[in-house]
Amino acid sequence: MSNNGGITSQYGFCYQKIVFIWYMLSNISKTNIFIYEGKEDIDIDENKEHSGLFSFKNENLEDIQVKSGVVTKEIWAKVVENWIILEDQNVKTLVSENAFQFEKDSSETIDYIYQHIQEGRVKNKLAISRKAYDNLSKSFGDNKEMWKEKIKSTIDDAKFIVKNLEDVENDIDKTYKEDYCTDICTYEEAKKLRVDQFKKECIARIDKFIMKKKSAVFNFNDFIKIETMIADNISDHKYQINIQEIKPKKQAEAKQLLNNDQIREVAQLKAVNTNSNFIIRELTRELFYKDFREIYIESTKKTEINNLESEAFSNYEDTKDELEFKGEYTTHDLFLETVAKGLKSSQLFPRGPIFNHGCYVYLTGKKVDSEIQISWSKK
């Protein structure tokens, strides 16, 4: 039985994180800090360390609510109530994945919000509607028209953005490639990988704060550290990724492949060792190699990748001949002694067992050219 409520909730958090990344990427400045789950879902506040360096007023400060689902009148009332109780002068913004299904500033809607706040009078002091009630009572007493005027002005002064997840991601993709991938001249896939890595690094940093029950805060230096690390790791001449961060996803993909013997890599690994942990580990390594290969195979580095795979096949043949000559041939020994041989013909190729093993396992695949296809089993 599926947990639709839980899935919807998780999707909402995913949407909020991507919107946060989009806002940060679009507004990055030494004068701003970006807060995930601060006063609002997302805050753009002034960086106090740099505020004294500039004489002009920072116009880019915002308190942003993010809604992935349908914005009902009740949800809208709560959004407006939250804006009313905020004491800063920041622009109030709602980013919604769906357009309003009612007039957000009609007399009927304002009456609804007014009544919703009135009902807050008997609620717990921590309730948003109660705080809005106390705020308006303090400012305007029982003057109903002044209350409604404040509600309307709050709505009129706010900014509204309707943007689905795909469009937000496309904007991130376009902005990051244009502003932070100008050094990549050859490989479009390398640009894509940089964008993906940027999002993953930002989300991982947010999650670390949330695990400590703290708001996630990013300043200009935090942004530049992430961007610089990614630029250093992924370029026309270098490929390096955060393996620990990506590994769980790759392992999950490998587990999905485990029991499909129609996949030649799986069948060949089972011929070496039927232990599921072994097979998952090696399939995971193949998936890492495939990501690397995809970036460079359709480019000027195609020859380098072909030479790398030819080197791997040559190592396999040499190992097989040597084991057969000694009368020590087993699929297990053939595998272990082959993958132990490092691949050196590519300057791009990341060193270490993960990509090394991954290349050899990839060459056992069904679609690999028969001239360089590896078989651990003699069958």
Image (cartoon, rainbow, N blue to C red):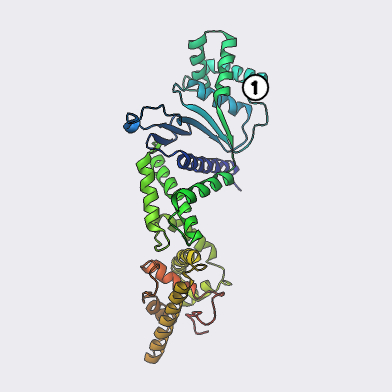
Camera-side residue: 187 or 379? 187
Q: Position of residue 111 (x, y in %)?
A: 64, 17
Residue at 42%, 42% in the rendered image = 206
- Name the residue tied to disc 1: 109
**Quick one: label 1, few (<14), some, or many (20+) residues within 10 Å?**
some
Above or below 45: residue 325: below
Camera-side residue: 212 or 36? 36
Q: Is residue 251 visible?
A: no
Count of marks placed on residues: 1
Q: Pick out the residue farthest to the front.
A: 55
Label 1 SS: helix
Q: Is residue 159 visible?
A: yes
Residue at 41%, 54% in the rendered image = 245
Q: Position of residue 194 (x, y in %)?
A: 45, 54
- Position of 27 with respect to 7 (left or right) is left
Camera-side residue: 134 or 235? 235
Above or below 79: residue 14: below
Q: Pick out the residue farthest to the top.
A: 142
Camera-side residue: 25 or 325? 25
Q: Position of residue 235 (x, y in %)?
A: 42, 59
Q: Quadrant of residue 142?
A: top right
Three-letter amino acid code at the position of disc 1: Thr
Q: Position of residue 198 (x, y in %)?
A: 44, 50
Above or below 121: residue 17: below
